[in-house]
């Protein structure tokens, strides 16, 4: 589940070499795995290896040598001169006995498979000149591509396309996946990612201490809340969702139902009086309580049994919502802020951040999408290819003092302590009106069960994506809470719990 930057992967290599392995032995393992993957992708026909001047190219040259030994026809294009190769890549070049084709688009021809061993994950500058032309020609060829480590042209630390990038059908990567495998647009270029062992012991992770992870149950399963046989609803927390005015009540109801499905023992909607009848008529297991003003919300939350609050979905933008947010933060409960609760602090985010840092509870989660994020973090543009989504969310978490969840197909959750998780399980049909409101509710319900904020956000994102997968294409937001029991059953099975 750990995700590495290219620098961290380099360190894993160096630690392994310092422990007695040779770099060339690692390259041999890598190249052999690439050759095996190539055979599985193309059981006949010629194979073209496009090799770069570094260790990624060395992996490709080893793969070419292995494939020839297995009786396959292989051609190799090398960027640069064979004599210019250094270190382990030079050793790999000595293993390759065949000729080298000119590094020209005309050399691509019509192979059955192309192995992309040009740049790998270490690229940190734009692709240009002949390499750019070759990448574009490969993409236009229609030939399936197997990428080595990461499709060439993708920044391994950010997932950005550095001018142009290979579109691979499959990618073979080593030891641990890289951040660029999960962040968009890099993930779209990778195809199916195959993770292989090349002889690096997992113990090196203790030295590297990676802080980025795939958002997967292995990351947080011990924190997943399971009701006790001798428990009761009052022991599973009481979540509050703050509703907006009469015409915007649906969002709060979606969130409230999400909180209930997430396992909160009780859920109450704090509703303006003019919307009370509508909310009460539409809700059954969820309770409704009249709350119009920030002072009334503060009075309600003085009852510490209300231990998690979700504000934002359909709350309305302006001073009243700001006041309710501040009242919630002052109450000592866990808080999820979404949508209108975030936009209400546009122009003066420091007021929000100071309130978060002054709150008696450190359990605060912000859940913006890309449109809302710059309203609080205006200096962190998503246009800079060297500033990744992961980096932006980490900075936001440190600045705000909250766990920050930046939504999208590659949702990132980051904690102020530097931990971060990237989701990869959200289907495209999850992008529908109201789905974010359900996510707010799920996280609020998990916080009500006293799950720590980072883990609650990660669990919520994963369950949200899995519920959408369970529902399938044609999903509307109301479907998400109906498929969550199936997701719960899956997690119970992972925990070995009979139900």
Image (tube, grey):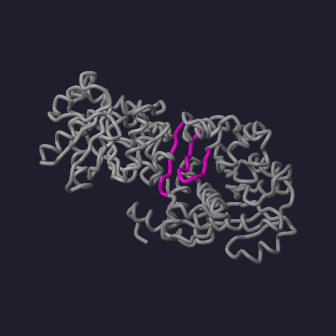
Q: Where is residue 410 in the image (x, y as percent from the top left)?
A: 53, 50
Q: Position of residue 169 (x, y in %)?
A: 36, 53
Q: Residue at x 43, y 66 (%)?
A: 490
Q: Is residue 159 left or right of residue 141?
A: right
Q: Is residue 15 left or right of residue 361?
A: left
Q: Position of residue 212 (x, y in %)?
A: 47, 40
Please tell me which residue lies in front, 186 or 259: 186
Please tell me which residue lies in front, 332 or 416: 416
Q: Which residue is drawn at 30% across and 35% down?
A: 51
Q: In this view, does 146 lie to the left or right of 165?
A: left
Is residue 416 magenta-colored? yes
Where 84 falls versus 283 (above or below)? Answer: above
Magenta-highlighted residues = 404-425
Residue 348 in view here:
yes
Q: In which quarter of the image is residue 153?
A: top left
In the rendered image, the quadrant that contains the C terminus is: bottom left
């Amino acid at each position: 589940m750990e995700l590495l930057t290219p620098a961290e992967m380099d360190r894993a290599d160096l630690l392994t070499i310092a422990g007695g392995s040779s770099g060339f032995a690692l390259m041999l393992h890598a190249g052999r795995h690439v050759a095996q993957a190539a055979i599985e992708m193309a059981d006949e026909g010629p194979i073209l290896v496009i090799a770069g001047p570094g260790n990624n190219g060395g992996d490709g040259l080893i793969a070419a040598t292995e494939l020839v030994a297995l009786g396959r026809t292989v051609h190799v294009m090398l960027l640069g001169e064979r004599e210019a190769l250094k270190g382990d890549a030079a050793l790999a070049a000595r293993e390759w006995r065949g000729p080298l084709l000119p590094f020209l688009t005309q050399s691509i021809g019509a192979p059955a498979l192309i192995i992309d061993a040009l740049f790998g994950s270490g690229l940190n500058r734009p692709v240009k000149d002949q390499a750019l032309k070759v990448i574009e020609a490969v993409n236009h060829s229609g030939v399936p591509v197997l990428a080595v480590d990461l499709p060439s042209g993708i920044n391994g630390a950010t997932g950005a396309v550095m001018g142009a990038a290979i579109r691979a059908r499959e990618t073979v990567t080593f030891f641990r996946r890289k951040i660029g495998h999960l962040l968009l647009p890099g993930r779209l270029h990778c195809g199916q990612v195959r993770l292989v062992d090349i002889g690096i012991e997992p113990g090196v992770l203790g030295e590297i201490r990676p802080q980025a992870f795939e958002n997967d149950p292995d990351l947080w399963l011990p924190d997943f809340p399971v009701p006790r046989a001798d428990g009761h609803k009052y022991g599973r927390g009481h979540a509050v969702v703050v509703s907006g005015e009469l015409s915007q009540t649906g969002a709060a109801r979606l969130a409230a139902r999400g909180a209930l499905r997430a396992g909160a023992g009780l859920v109450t909607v704090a509703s303006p009086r003019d919307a009370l009848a509508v909310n009460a008529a539409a809700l059954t297991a969820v309770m409704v309580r009249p709350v119009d003003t920030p002072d009334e919300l503060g009075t309600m939350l003085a009852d510490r049994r209300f231990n998690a609050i979700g504000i934002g979905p359909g709350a309305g933008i302006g001073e009243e919502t700001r006041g309710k947010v501040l009242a919630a933060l002052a109450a000592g409960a866990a808080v999820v802020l979404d949508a209108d609760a975030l936009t209400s602090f546009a122009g003066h985010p420091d007021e929000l951040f100071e309130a978060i840092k002054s709150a008696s509870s450190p359990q605060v989660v912000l859940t913006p999408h890309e449109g809302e994020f710059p309203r609080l973090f205006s200096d962190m543009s998503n246009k800079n290819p060297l500033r990744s989504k992961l980096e932006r969310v980490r900075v936001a978490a440190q600045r705000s003092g909250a766990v920050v969840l930046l939504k999208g197909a590659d949702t990132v959750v980051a904690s102020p302590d530097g931990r971060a998780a990237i989701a990869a399980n959200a289907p495209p049909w999850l992008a529908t009106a109201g789905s974010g409101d359900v996510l707010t509710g799920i996280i609020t319900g998990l916080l009500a069960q006293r799950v720590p904020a980072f883990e609650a956000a990660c669990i919520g994102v994963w369950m949200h994506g899995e519920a959408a997968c369970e529902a399938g294409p044609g999903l509307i937001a109301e479907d998400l809470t109906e498929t969550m029991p199936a997701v719960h059953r899956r997690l119970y099975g992972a925990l070995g719990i009979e139900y």
